[in-house]
Amino acid sequence: MEMRTAFHKRLREIQNDILAMGSMVEKAIMRSIEALKNRDLEMAHRIIAEDQKINEKRFDIEEKCIQLIATQQPMASDLRSIICILNIITELERIGDYAEGIAKIVIMIGDEPPLKPLIDVPRMAEKTASMLHRSLEAFVTCDTETARKVVSEDNEVDALYDQVFRELISFMVEDPKTITRATRLIWVAHNLERSADRVTNICERVVYFVTGKMEEIGASKY
Amino acid sequence: MEGIVLALLILLTLASISITLLLLRRASATREGLRALTEMARRAVDTPADSSARMAPGGKVEELAEALKLWEAKLKSITGDLAEEREKLAAILSTIGAGVLLVNKDSEVTMLNQTAERLFGVSGESALGRPFISLARDHEMDSIVRRCLETNEKQVGAVQVAGSRRYLELAATPLSHGALVLVQDLTNVRRLEKMRRDFIGNISHELRTPIASLKALVETLQDGAIADKDVAQDFLHRMHVETDKLAQMASELSELSRIESGDSPLKLKPLDVTEVARRVVERLRPQAERAQLELILDMPANLPPVMGDEDRVEQVLVNVIHNAIKFTPPKGKITISSLVEDDHVLISVSDTGIGIPADDLPRIFERFYKVDQARSGGGTGLGLAIAKHIVQAHGGRIWAESEEGKGTTVAFSLPTAKS
Ligand SMILES: Nc1ncnc2c1ncn2[C@@H]1O[C@H](COP(=O)(O)OP(=O)(O)O)[C@@H](O)[C@H]1O
Ligand SMILES: [Mg+2]
């Protein structure tokens, strides 16, 4: 009994770490788009530096998981939750990389004149961040319903991506001088689309962790 | 909670003492034991040095009973005080504008007030026992609390929350078994601060331009240009334009502060808006012609009268039409039309101008908001804010629709006068 409670106490600490890491990643996404909107190069550099901390957090959590396996010899179901955690932090780290990618694009864009006012791209970011937020809520509360709901919202991000993509292509066709700038914005949108996909992976993991069954809930369009 | 625990404690103590007493009697133990017990009971009530409670050697059972009674009374008054304190505390916590939380050493929430529940979007029951991060969902806030628990020192910090974009200020104070966390929502304060900064920035920007050009004109005149009659005439005319601009800004600012403070009430009377619009159009026509714009008044003469303050309604029309003139390139068209809708008359001003980006559209009625500082044509950014205040004071509504590059329509409604 002593061992079991110690195990769960540690597991809970790791869950808290995941929420902290999630918050780091969520902010990185929102700030990368803020930086893009405001041409804020300083903020972009800060996001890139912060990504280092996200990576460190991931290794820190991974290390804690390994310690937990080594010292507590968890049973099958507990082992499953640890493996779920390992998967989630991998996805989170990747999403962090996408945010960093956006920050790098912001630096590339520098002070070029804007191609168009940004509307759908911030919407994509907002949606993705909100999905991420709720996916982790679903994880800590073992809420498969929320997890499934979040997966179903990936369509909206895909639809926005479509829209941004088509619009930017039309810019390029109309005026080839815009190609470089349009391509950069497409990268940004692409990074957001991939991030939302990673969130659906997290949700699938949560469902697996709770029900013990692996299911691909909603296959993404991309 | 504490009250109940305390009451239980008293009961238990009393019970155990009476049992001890019984045992003592049955065993006919020495009076020494009784005396010690009595002394103990008294000590619990009074400070040991209290002479009145001192006991004669060889105590009696009656004395012990007396001492116990005193003890009980004292405990009762303590629990009463505690309950009262708790009540006071609960009242303070529920009315305080800041979020208040208590966390234990493991950073788990053990208490929170209503404001904290609202700030974090949780309800009290479900929040208790949960780790702070799972309520706050923000690693920066969490680390403030953690640092406080680790260092045992007060920690303060302001954080922009991940999801909600609110600014919260946290102060975590160490307690013996955890920490007290005070959360204040600074979102509005920040917004006001930004507005004030923008205000000062805008005012100084707006002042700088006409003043700089006046200065240049005066200096050129002083340097000899005054001798050339034609040049001097032209310069004087330009100086006139600049002073007009300054005068307009001063009057707009005072108008806005007057409306906002509400000390000049509307002088309402039934109005023929078509007539008011015609006057405004005639006044602005020279400007429109200079800008090569066609100004069309498409309002019928038989509109139902509206209930309005004539000067103010005129001001709204001037501000809106003036914008249309400023933001429409040459050869464009500006149309003023009307529509009767239930008990309101809608007046709209459409132009074929540069339009307003969708992102900016909701904000153009804010004070000092200008889409493009450089292109605002020397305006202060106050025109639409004033128009909005006036229309709303009339019980009407004002809004804008626009497409970039195609044009803008600004429309407002005024209530019809009841005949
Ligand atoms: N008809 C219009 N067409 C395009 N932009 C407009 C129009 N009317 C208002 N705006 C935008 O809204 C801003 C605010 O208008 P206003 O409050 O009248 O301030 P100002 O005219 O002094 O700049 C303007 O600076 C401009 O960017
Ligand atoms: Mg104006």
Image: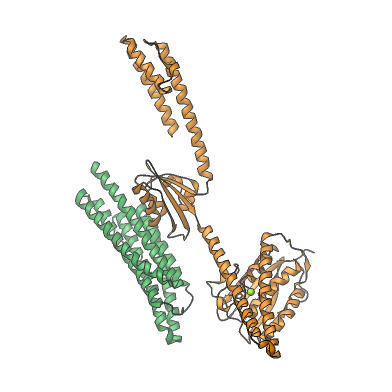
Chain colours: A green, B orange
Q: Is residue A188 left or right of residue B209?
A: left
Query: Residue placed farthest to the right in the image?
Result: B419
Q: Position of residue B399 (x, y in %)?
A: 62, 69
A138 shown above or below A106 = above
B414 shown above or below B226 = above
Q: Is residue A187 left or right of residue A58?
A: right
Q: Is residue B66 left or right of residue A72?
A: right
Q: Position of residue B148 (x, y in %)?
A: 37, 49
User: Ligand 2, what quadrant?
Assistant: bottom right
Which quadrant of the view contains residue B102? top left
Q: Quadrant of the N terminus of chain B?
A: top left
The residue located at (77%, 76%) in the rendering is: B301
The residue located at (66%, 76%) in the rendering is: B245
Q: Position of residue B365 (x, y in %)?
A: 60, 68
Q: Is residue B171 left or right of residue B33?
A: right
Report the label total. 0
B49 shown above or below B358 = above
Can the viewer see residue A148 in this picture?
no
The residue located at (63%, 82%) in the rendering is: B219
Which residue is at the front of the view, B353 or B100? B100
Can the viewer see residue A47 in this picture?
yes
Q: Position of residue B59 (x, y in %)?
A: 38, 11
Which residue is at the front of the view, B253 or B285? B253
Which quadrant of the view contains residue A30? bottom left
Q: Quadrant of the C terminus of chain B?
A: bottom right
Which quadrant of the view contains residue B231? bottom right
